[in-house]
Image (cartoon, rainbow, N blue to C red):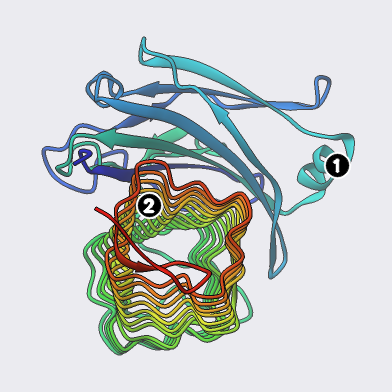
Amino acid sequence: MMSMVRAALITVSLLLTSLGSIPVSGASPVAGEVPVVQIGSVNLNPARSAISIPVTFDRDVLRQDGRHAVHIGVLATTGADTSVIVSNRERNKPGTSGRKTFLLPLTSGEMAEVQAADSWTVAVTLTVANAGGGDAGRKADSAWYDQATQRSGQPAASARIEDRDCSGRAIEPGADLSGCDFIGGYFRGMDLSGADMSGARFYYATMDRVSLEDAILRDAHFNYARLDSADLEGADLRDALFTGASMNYADLHGLPIREADFSDASLNAANLAGVDLSDSSLSYLSIINADLSNANLVGTALYKVNASRARLTEANLTGAVLRDVNLQSANLQRANLQDVSADGVRFTRVEADHAIFTRASLAGASLDGAKLEWTNFRRANLRGAFMNGAYLANATLLGADDVGLNLVGARLCNTVMPNGKVSNWC
């Protein structure tokens, strides 16, 4: 079996404010930890329409086995309005020496918007996708650079003033934090269970291991925030935005989250058992090794989703539309995929015993090496599909369109073929 790949997000945010600043402590928030990132002098260069960001990385992190990449974003705040000016999804490399200066190009319009803003923020995110298991590479600190004081360090969990003054509000269980602006705030390991955060903004915030149990998060913005191992049991996520958020190992089981936006988010190894995502749209999502057992995905549209090794046992995907989805080595035992549209989808080496693919469209799909015992493919579209080396004992393909179906090396034991004949090529 392939070794399990665990993705870990190491988040580093740099704050540059032209008017006012968020206080920085100049030290790591966790005693004894070595900062993953230290920041030099950051410069805005209007002549070149770019921002120069010198960064020093912890070389021990860079030596970890895995793929390293850097994401850079710019946010501008004018009055109570904060907007993302640019989100550079290009996979910049941090290098191996531990020191690198990133030059972030801006369009003339973006540069003008940054210069006209009351304040602006540059955020840098280092991603380390490690191989070999374990939690290596998941520990990180958030480093900030304040242009006004030219000091770098660690921010406390503090709020800016949006449409109300939140600076005096206690950050504790059951707190009223609705409408507050916590851009880049530091909440690691805090207990915010039962808190009202409706309409609050947590862009690029560090919130790993935070407890949000039974919290009200309606219309809250967690864009590019880090919520690894967060506990969201019983939380109200209606209309919440988690675009680009890292939520690896987070607990969302049983939540009706279909009205939330998880585009471009990472939910690897997250607990999504029993969630309701029916009739929703999920794009550029990573749910590697996540638990979606008994999940409701009826009518869900999935585009460019990596669900390899995900557990979808007894999940309901009736009528779902899958495009450029990777389900390699996923567990689909007893899952309902009738009427699903999954042309060209990778089901390689899935375990789909007793699964239902009745009337499913699987043209060109890859099911090589799949375990398909007692699986139902009645009237399915299997044109040009690949089932090489698959195990189809007691499966039925009755009435399926098998033009161009590849069955090289497949084990057909008491298998009902499309023409109704029983095959015993065991």
CA neighbours of label 2 inside 10 A, class few (<14), some (14 to 19), many (20+): many
The mark total stands at 2
Rendered residue at 23%/63% (across/down) = 209
Q: Is residue 225 left or right of residue 78?
A: left
Quadrant into which the N terminus falls? top left
For the residues marked 1 and 2, what is the alpha-carbon distance in whole angstroms?
43 Å
Observer-nearest of 267 and 119:
267
Q: Is residue 128 visible?
A: yes
Name which quarter of the figure residue 227 lies in.
bottom left
- Under mark 2, the amino acid is Ser
Can you tell which mark lies on residue 150? none
Q: Residue furthest front?
A: 421
Q: Nearer the viewer, residue 181 or 353?
A: 353
Residue 311 position in % (x across, y down) = 29, 66
Taking the image as shown, residue 224 lies to the left or right of residue 411, namely right
Residue 124: image location, x then y, percent: 50, 38
Circles 1 and 2, Cβ within 8 Å, touching? The answer is no
Could you say which is closer to the camera, residue 423 or residue 131? Answer: 423
What residue is shown at x 33% (from left), y 56% (from top)?
A: 350
* Amino acid under disc 1: Ala
Pinpoint residue 112: horizontal percent, then vertical percent.
Answer: 86, 42
Front: mark 1 or 2? 2
The foreground one among 404 and 52 is 404
Q: Is residue 110 left or right of residue 103?
A: right
In the drawing, what numbered circle is on residue 308? Answer: 2
Answer with mark 1 or mark 2, whichever residue precedes in sequence: 1
Q: Which residue is disc 1 drawn over? A: 112
Residue at image location 43% in from the left, 52% down from the top = 367
Residue 150 seen from this side: no
Element class at badge 2 = loop
- Horizontal side of residue 314 vs 337, given as left or right: left
